[in-house]
Image (cartoon, rainbow, N blue to C red):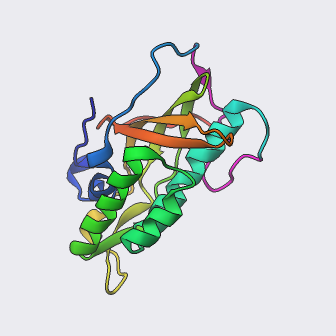
């Protein structure tokens, strides 16, 4: 079940709600191994180098998703699909593109971007789950025409618990298949 709420009463949640709510479903595998804590140094600004370890590849794919999502939100729906395809698959991709279409109609776009603070990663075969304390303090909305920040959408103290489902494709890439926002604030892992 997915619950998306206005975070701290602000409209910043629209950034993610517009693009994520329709696709807010996580099809987590039924038998995942025990939770593995993510390294405290994981950040979107410094993606981990590629390796053959599933954990590292999952962290890299999930972390790269957020900047791609922010860029897609500033694009046309067609361009958004192209930008997101390396990171997202299936119905979740279609719903995100619909969210971009809605943002275009509302004449809004992302301003800044959310920063992942991964707390744990669980891997089971070709399925994985990432639990994140998403830092949205650097994310808000802007007017699509002027690209100026809409002040009431900014909140410097915003975090939310996110659970993302990923699946490994036949070519070995990990892609998101769903995302759930719990609507609860969280404490990012210590560095």
The x and y percentages for residue 143 are 30, 78
The x and y percentages for residue 129 are 51, 29
Query: Which residues are drawn in magenta?
Result: 34-49
The magenta stretch spans residue 47 = yes
The x and y percentages for residue 183 are 29, 38
Left or right position of 91 against 29: left
**Residue 88 showing in the rendered view:** yes
Q: Name the quadrant of the N terminus.
A: top left
Badge count: 0
The magenta stretch spans residue 180 = no
Give the prevailing secondary structure in the magenta stretch. loop
Q: Is residue 64 above or below residue 142?
A: above
Left or right position of 174 against 72: right
**Residue 112 showing in the rendered view:** no
Q: Name the quadrant of the C terminus.
A: top right
Left or right position of 53 against 60: right
Residue at position x 46%, y 71% in the image = 79
Front residue of this view, candidates 158 and 130: 130
Q: Is residue 156 above or below residue 42?
A: below
Residue at position x 55%, y 29% in the image = 128
Front residue of this view, candidates 71 and 11: 71
Q: Is residue 153 above or below residue 160?
A: below
């Amino acid at each position: 079940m997915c619950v998306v709420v206005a975070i701290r009463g602000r409209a910043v949640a629209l950034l993610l709600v517009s693009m994520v709510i329709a696709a807010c479903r996580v099809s987590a595998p039924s038998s995942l191994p025990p939770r593995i804590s993510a390294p405290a140094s994981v950040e979107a600004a410094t993606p981990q180098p590629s390796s053959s370890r599933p954990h590292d590849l999952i962290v890299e794919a999930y972390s790269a998703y957020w900047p791609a999502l922010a860029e897609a939100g500033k694009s046309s729906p067609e361009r958004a699909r192209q930008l997101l395809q390396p990171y997202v698959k299936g119905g979740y991709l279609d719903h995100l593109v619909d969210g971009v279409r809605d943002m275009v109609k509302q004449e809004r776009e992302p301003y800044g971007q959310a920063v992942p603070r991964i707390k744990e990663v669980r891997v089971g075969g070709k399925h994985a789950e990432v639990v994140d304390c998403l830092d949205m303090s650097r994310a808000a909305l802007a007017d699509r025409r002027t690209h100026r920040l809409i002040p009431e959408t900014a909140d410097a103290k915003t975090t939310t618990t996110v659970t993302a489902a990923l699946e490994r494709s036949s070519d070995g890439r990990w892609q998101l298949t769903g995302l759930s926002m719990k609507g609860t604030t969280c404490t990012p892992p210590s560095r």
